[in-house]
Amino acid sequence: MAKILDLQAEVRTQSGTGAVKRMRKAGTIPAALYGRKVKPSSIQVHGKTFSKLLEGSASDNILVSLKIAGSTEEQLALVQEVQHDYLRGGILHIDFHAVAADEEIHANVPVAMIGEAKGLKQGGLVEAIHHEIEVRCLPKDLPESIEIDVTGLEVGQGIHVREITFPAGVICHLGGDVVIVMCEEPKVEVEPEPTAAAAPAAGAKPAAAAAPAAGAKPAAAAAKPAAKK
């Protein structure tokens, strides 16, 4: 199950491009907290602390318990979106989605294949048709991944949703007949067939007819009718 990680936060009182630049220079990351039952608020978190939290997580679904300075209550939240600065490095902004411990949440959980499929020895290739599975569950039951044992998978076989054992309290949104993992047949490379004799290049003139032998008379164009008596 996904761990609930403690994260310190502060209310953000300043806004604007200049304030955000100063904030990032000081090592903090601007963030927003919103949800169905909470008032949207602007907050900030410590940059290095949050980066370590991301690096130590095995899943994109990160649950945190936000401890906002000045408040006696903690807010359970799901990291909804992280905006990265791909040019300079670092994190630009974070969106936290406030959730309640007793209410179901929806999340896409990554698929983790375990074991070595029988089909691999037959030259097959095991592929995940769906790399993530949408589920709903209580926050405490949110798994880091959905493990699928592919050991018995042979060439041409697949694993359907109905064959997967989901953790207790986790409900899948996909139908039971949906294939999640497939062992594809080995791909055979077909050698190209030999091509026919090369055709004359475009624009080339056909070969000239053979010239008649020296002294030979040309054949008559047409036979003359017989003379009448």
Image: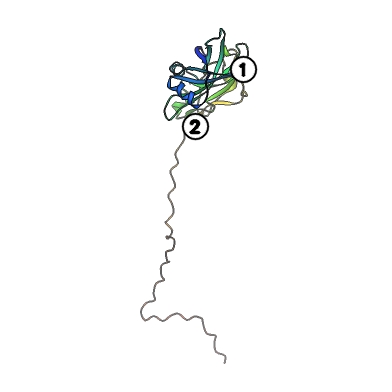
Give the amino acid at mark 1.
Lys
The kind of secondary structure element at disc 1 is strand
Q: State the scheme by which the image is colored.
A: rainbow
Residue found at x 35% / y 79%: 214
Label of residue 185 in the image: 2
As drawn, which residue projects farthest toward the bottom?
A: 229
Viewer-proximal residue, 126 or 20?
Answer: 20
- Compared to 216, does 67 lie above or below? above
Distance, label 1 to label 2, CA atoms, is: 54 Å
- Asked whether the beta carbons under mark 1 and mark 2 sit within 8 Å of each other, the answer is no
Whole-percent x and y of residue 100? 61, 13
Residue found at x 49% / y 12%: 8
Label of residue 21 in the image: none
Identify the image quadrant of residue 175.
top right
Whole-percent x and y of residue 77? 56, 15
Viewer-proximal residue, 184 or 68?
Answer: 68
Which residue, given by chain and number where applicable, does mark 1 sit on? 39
The kind of secondary structure element at disc 2 is loop
Tell how many labels.
Answer: 2
Give the amino acid at mark 2.
Glu
Q: Nearer the viewer, mark 1 or mark 2?
A: 1
